Structures are given as C-alpha cells and as structure tokens.
Image: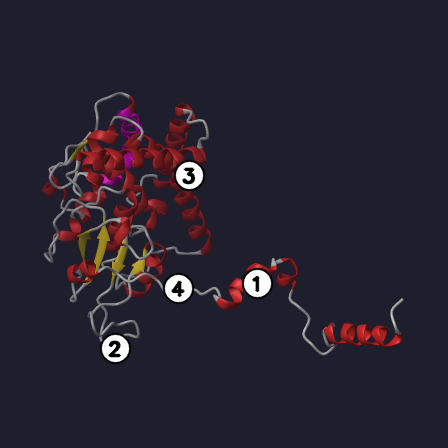
Amino acid sequence: MPSPSAATNTATSSTQSRPQTNQAAPSSTSSWTPKPIRILFSHFPLQTLPANQLPSRTLSLTSRKKHTLFIFTTACADDSSNAAQIPSFNPTCLKWQTYLLMRGIRFGIRPSNNHASPSGSLPFLTPSESPNSKEHNKSTGIGKPIPAGSLQSWINQNSDSTKLQGEDEALILRESAFLSLLEHRVRPAWLHAFYLTANLYSLAAPLYIHSTTTSGLLRTWQTAQLRTAALAEVEKTVPKLDLEVLYHGAESAFEALETALGEGDWFFGREQPGMLDAAVFGYTCLLSNQRLGVEMDGKWSEEETSQRLRGVIHRFKRLRDHQARVSDRYFSMSKTGSQKV
C-alpha cells in the first residue's frame, strides 16, 4: 500500500502534467493528424512555391517590341507581319491565335511545347508591356506570361477593337453553352480521329514528335504516350469507346452550331466575330485541310475511320463557308499550301 507522501507526490505530478486551463485548445486538425506527421511539419512547414520561371531560351525568343504567342506550330516564325497568320495545327492554340487576330491585337508567334509553358500547357502569351507597367520586367523587357486561362481577360483589357455587339448576359450564357458543346462533343471525336486512328502516324507524330527528336526509340515511345493520353481523355466522355456514340455526338454538336450560325456571317448575328467563331474555326480549319503544317508535315490518312470526322464536317455547308470566311479575313492560308476537302 503506497504511503501518503507517495500519493501526494503522484497527485502533484499528475496535476503538473495536465495542460493549464488558459492554454489554447488544440485545433481540430491536430486531433486526427498523427503525432509523427505533426512533428515533421513543425520542422518543415508547407509552403506555396512561386510559379515556374520561363526557360532562358523562351526569353531569348520573345520580342521586346510586341506580344508573343507561344503555340504548337511547325512555322519558323519571325517578327514579320505575316507570322501570326500561319495557323497552328492544334485546335486550342488555333482558337486563341484566331481570337487575338479577331480582336485586332498585334502579336508574333513562336513554336513551343507544353514543357516550356509556366502552366504546363499551350498556348501562353508573353506581353511586351510599357516600362510603366507594374508587371514589366526591367531585366527582360517583357511582362509576366499570360496562360490560356487568363487570355480572354487580358485580351479584353488590351484590345483596341470596339466592344462586340449584343454582349448581354443571356448571350454570354448561350455562347458558354456552345463552347461547352465543343469541349464535350467535338473534342473527344477530334482526339479519336487524330490520335487513335492511322492519323497518329501520318499527322500527330510528324507534327508533335518528329520535330523534337530524330531518335527512333524516343519517337516510338512518345507516339505510344500520345495514344495512351488521348485514349484516357476520350474514355472520360465515352467510357467504352463506342464510335457510334462518339461521332454521333460530334455530328449533333456541329448540327446545333450550324443552326446557331444561321444565315449570318458570325454566330448569334453579331456584326463582329467572337470567341465561338474562333473556337469553331479551330476545328473546322484543321478538318477542312488535307495537309497540316507549314511544310505539309502531316497528312490526313485515307483510311475510312481516319476520315470519319472530316466527313461529318463536310455535310455542314454553312460551317464550311464560315471557315472560309475566317481564313480569308485573318489568315494567309495560301502560304500553307493547304488542300481543301
């Protein structure tokens, strides 16, 4: 049996070991976070790292005199006025390239890839801003890179063109719905046609891979990677890769777009082309040309499945007329030597 003094000492030490009532209560996070993890992060706290810096080669290619758009292209672009009028072979890059031209912004283009982009994807734009700008980098003479997700806001702030007509909330919502239709119905069919058919070897590999390496082993591996990535994206929309469902969705989307275009020059009866015009052109331009790339690097395969999406767009005359209208107004298409469907 313990002595009274031992009991007193035990009670005293127990009292001293208990936390004081005026101490802050532990957070809810610490109640379930294992103690070793809490100790680890007390020594190495989480930090938000700054955005990646542009590669030095990118800075050396950037014009200090005007904005530069980095896109997928086989063009060896220079600072000439025609450089921006050479269409990209990538639908997303071509959409933004077209929209910049539509909004009257002067810019140059440079060939690039996703690894060179601060956000990990193309396109991105490096603005050549005035020395008084807060974002102006005195050491490089250019502004902070603008990723694709911020391009529209930047264009709205920097375009000298007049405001697009009829920009009420209902029209903006309607345009967003059609842009979503392109993303979820046309894009999966494009990915299948471009990467999961014979076009992988006649179009995708020559345009995306052959210009980056001459190693046969690397080309084979990168081509397989392209196919795997495309298949994963397509199956997000069509899980079992049902081609009838896939291409019927694209055809329905193009039919809805042709109806929205109507008899006017631009979507929704606008007097000037808008974002939807640029986004639709990003696909119709590439589908309407037999060869892609400045040096005709890629060619659509003649295999039936490879031509299926091109056959779909061929059935919509007003969309093809719209494509020709945009080409004639904004692009020096004759320089690409493109062959129409």
**In the image, residue 228 lies at what x, y percent?**
35, 34
From the image, tell me which residue sits under label 2.
132
Residue density around tag 3, few if under 14, some if 14–19, many if 20 or more, within 10 Å: some
In the rendered structure, are the residues bearing label 2 and label 3 in contact, judged by CB atoms less than 8 Å apart? no
- Answer whether residue 48 is magenta in the image: no
Is residue 50 at all visible to an observer of this figure?
A: yes
Q: Quadrant of the N terminus?
A: bottom right
Q: In the picture, residue 188 is in which quadrant?
A: top left
Is residue 99 at all visible to an observer of this figure?
A: no
Mark 4 / mark 3, whichever is N-terminal: 4
The amino acid sitting under disc 1 is Arg
Q: CA distance from mark 2 to mark 4?
A: 27 Å
- Answer whether residue 318 is magenta in the image: yes
From the image, tell me which residue sits under label 4.
49
Q: CA distance from mark 4 to mark 3?
A: 33 Å
Q: Nearer the viewer's eye, disc 1 or disc 4?
A: 1
Which residue is rendered at x = 39% and y = 24% of the image? 243
Please name whichever residue, 274 or 91, is drawn nearer the observer in this view of the structure.
Answer: 91
Q: CA distance from mark 1 to mark 3?
A: 43 Å
Is disc 2 placed on a helix, strand or loop?
loop
Mark 2 / mark 4, whichever is N-terminal: 4
Mark 1 / mark 3, whichever is N-terminal: 1
From the image, tell me which residue sits under label 3.
184
Q: Which residues are magenta?
A: 306-323
Mark 2 / mark 3, whichever is N-terminal: 2
**In the image, residue 162 lies at what x, y percent?**
29, 61
From the image, tell me which residue sits under label 1.
38
